[in-house]
């Protein structure tokens, strides 16, 4: 079987298109590359959707945590503490069993026990908490002069937030947020190892890498393939977020721009 | 555990729970918490020394050595840590068996990899097929510790590498002006000063390490996640004196609470430590402390 044929059969296997049965023995390199790459679709799905939705919630959380009103501040503080203080792995387990119990009572929760929705919700809440903390930190370090200038122009309330505070917050938070995005994508590999069932062997990249390692008892091929895919994914994220960072800093003289520094200070 | 536990069906709610929570399997569950703490206690120093070695080699003047250090740091950054965990557990096991195989059975002529099998001579098996259950368990635990140390060593190396660079250059120059050699300046000036710069990163790493402990479950250790799943599952009267429905959710709430208290506790302790370390240092934190008291 040629490699092109394999790609046609298994390229979209992780979302249920193509050959139904996974290869059983004498795995070729091409099969391993194709299936693990196909699994990456799920990692990207979880990562992109959680980031996109989590971003807005995180903004709200960051503002709420910086609020002077205790009724707004306390819930945000507790939410962030809850999700940052406990392991994501345990959160996945807990959410799955919670949804399982709810499903028994209300049929509405049927979809929540499958990974595409249930795990996505956990990732959404989790990334919102981590990002909320980053945004809160950025809000506190907005230069005093910026807000004073806004006051001098007679801005207040929503226009002041929308046009002065929010862009500055984003600009300051962006390097840390890039890190968060990288580690969110890494965290998506946990989904199928934490009780969320893989239906008809439709899993993510790590699921397939683990499948090959179990079948061949040789970890030295599938895991490096997975590593290569993830390094590529990381580079894409860095490139994309770097471009946005440039855009956010475009009004500043070069030496005052926020530098992208990559640190691993946020991992689950 | 208690004398009144002989017939659980007749008990009131409170005494039922007091019996239920002290059954033999629950004691194994509690012991698994000790396992987690033990893992942390063993891994943290080992990972720190791995990290120190990594950072030292990354800033080495010998070019290949510095490449090794930098690759070690960079690799763990780009790849999900859980992939490393799954990889190293098999890879380390096979590496050990392969080395023992080469030493113990030099005249074994069959290939080691036969299709989907990894076959070494029986004397090279780790642990030996005849050894006791506890040896199998401790071997698995040791593999887990090494895996954790390798992964977190890379994180620690990154933190320490940054901290070594954060020590003001003038300090080293002064040391060199006093006639210290490169090695002397490193050990007497750089290393004692770098900790205050490293502490924020290291305390973060400690939190990350705590939150990574449930991954023990993936390495095949009977840890708290394993027991929570086992004990929480539906139990019928046929097999146990304490039948109950699906309680896994409640067990995982207990784990969540355990981790939340543990991280919170560590946070408070580390905050105190930072306060003490910054005292009198020429950093912005130390300056702020000085102004507060003045």
Image: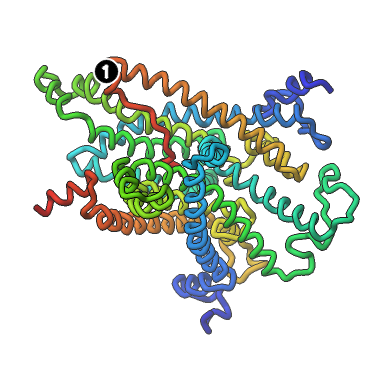
Q: Residue at x 25, y 33 (%)?
A: A139
Q: Residue at x 71, y 51 (%)?
A: B95
Residue most extreme to the bottom: B3
Q: A11 and A264: which one is in front?
A: A264
Q: Where's residue A115, x and y in %?
A: 57, 37
Q: B74 and B236: which one is in front?
A: B74
From this view, report whether residue B8 is shown above or below residue A115: below
Q: Where's residue B279, x and y in %?
A: 22, 55
Q: Residue at x 80, y 54 (%)?
A: B102
| Residue named by callout 1 | A252
Q: A140 and A21: which one is in front?
A: A140
Q: Where's residue A30, x and y in %?
A: 75, 27
Query: Is B14 positioned to the left or the right of A158 in the image?
Result: right
Res A118 seen here: no
Q: Residue at x 67, y 67 (%)?
A: B239
Asked which quadrant contains residue A246, the reply is top left
Q: Where's residue A45, x and y in %?
A: 54, 28
From this view, report whether residue B163 is shown above or below residue B40: above
From this view, report whether residue A231 is shown above or below residue A152: below
Crowd tier of the residue under label 1, counting other residues whose Cα lies within 10 Å: few below 14, some 14–19, many 20 or above: few
Q: Disc 1: which chain?
A: A
Q: Secondary structure at mark 1?
A: loop
Query: Is A145 positioned to the left or the right of A140 in the image?
Result: left
Residue most extreme to the front: B179
């Amino acid at each position: 079987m040629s490699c092109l044929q394999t790609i046609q059969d298994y390229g979209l296997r992780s979302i249920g298109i193509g050959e139904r049965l996974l290869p059983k023995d004498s795995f070729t390199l091409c099969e391993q590359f194709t299936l693990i790459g196909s699994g990456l679709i799920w990692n990207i799905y979880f990562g992109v959707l959680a980031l996109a939705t989590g971003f807005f919630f995180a903004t709200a959380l960051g503002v709420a945590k910086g609020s002077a009103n205790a009724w707004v501040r306390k819930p945000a503080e507790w939410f962030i503490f809850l999700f940052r203080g406990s392991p994501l792995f345990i959160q996945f387990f807990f959410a799955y069993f919670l949804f399982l119990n709810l499903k028994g009572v209300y049929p509405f929760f049927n979809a929540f026990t499958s990974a595409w929705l249930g795990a996505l919700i956990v990732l959404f809440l989790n990334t919102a908490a981590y990002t909320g903390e980053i945004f809160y930190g950025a809000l506190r370090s907005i230069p005093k002069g910026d807000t004073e200038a806004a006051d001098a122009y007679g801005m207040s309330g929503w226009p002041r937030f929308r046009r002065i505070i929010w862009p500055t917050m984003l600009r300051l938070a962006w390097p840390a947020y890039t890190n968060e995005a990288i580690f969110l994508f890494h965290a998506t590999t946990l989904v199928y190892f934490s009780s969320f069932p893989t239906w008809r062997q439709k899993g993510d990249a790590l699921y397939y890498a683990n499948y090959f390692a179990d079948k061949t008892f040789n970890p030295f091929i599938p895991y490096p393939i997975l590593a290569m895919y993830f390094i590529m994914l990381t580079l894409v994220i860095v490139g994309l977020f770097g471009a946005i960072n440039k855009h956010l800093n475009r009004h500043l003289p070069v030496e005052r721009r926020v530098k992208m520094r990559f640190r691993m200070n946020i991992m689950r | 555990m208690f004398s009144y536990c002989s017939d659980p069906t007749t008990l009131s709610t409170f005494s039922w729970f007091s019996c239920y929570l002290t059954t033999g399997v629950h004691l194994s569950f509690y012991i698994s918490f000790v396992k987690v703490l033990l893992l942390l206690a063993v891994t943290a120093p080992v990972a720190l020394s791995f990290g120190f070695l990594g950072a030292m080699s990354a800033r080495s003047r010998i070019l290949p050595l510095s490449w090794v250090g930098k690759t070690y740091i960079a690799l763990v950054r780009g790849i999900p840590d859980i992939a490393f965990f799954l990889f190293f557990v098999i890879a380390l096991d096979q590496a050990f068996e392969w080395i023992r195989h080469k030493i113990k059975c030099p005249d074994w002529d069959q290939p080691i990899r036969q299709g989907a099998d990894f076959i070494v001579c029986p004397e090279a098996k780790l642990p030996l097929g005849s050894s006791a259950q506890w040896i199998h368990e401790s071997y698995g635990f040791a593999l887990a510790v090494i895996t954790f140390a390798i992964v977190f060593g890379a994180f620690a190396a990154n933190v320490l590498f940054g901290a070594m660079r954060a020590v003001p250059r003038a300090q080293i120059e002064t040391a060199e002006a006093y006639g210290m050699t490169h090695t002397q300046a490193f050990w007497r000036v750089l290393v004692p000063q770098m900790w205050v710069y490293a502490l924020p990163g290291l305390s973060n790493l400690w939190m990350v390490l705590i939150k990574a402990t449930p991954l023990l479950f993936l390495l095949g250790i009977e840890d708290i996640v394993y027991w929570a799943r086992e004990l929480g599952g539906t139990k019928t009267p046929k097999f146990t004196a304490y039948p109950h429905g699906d309680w896994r959710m409640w067990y995982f709430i207990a784990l969540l609470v355990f981790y939340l208290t543990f991280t919170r506790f560590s946070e408070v302790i580390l905050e105190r430590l930072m306060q003490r370390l910054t005292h009198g240092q020429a950093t912005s934190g130390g300056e702020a402390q000085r102004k507060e008291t003045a």
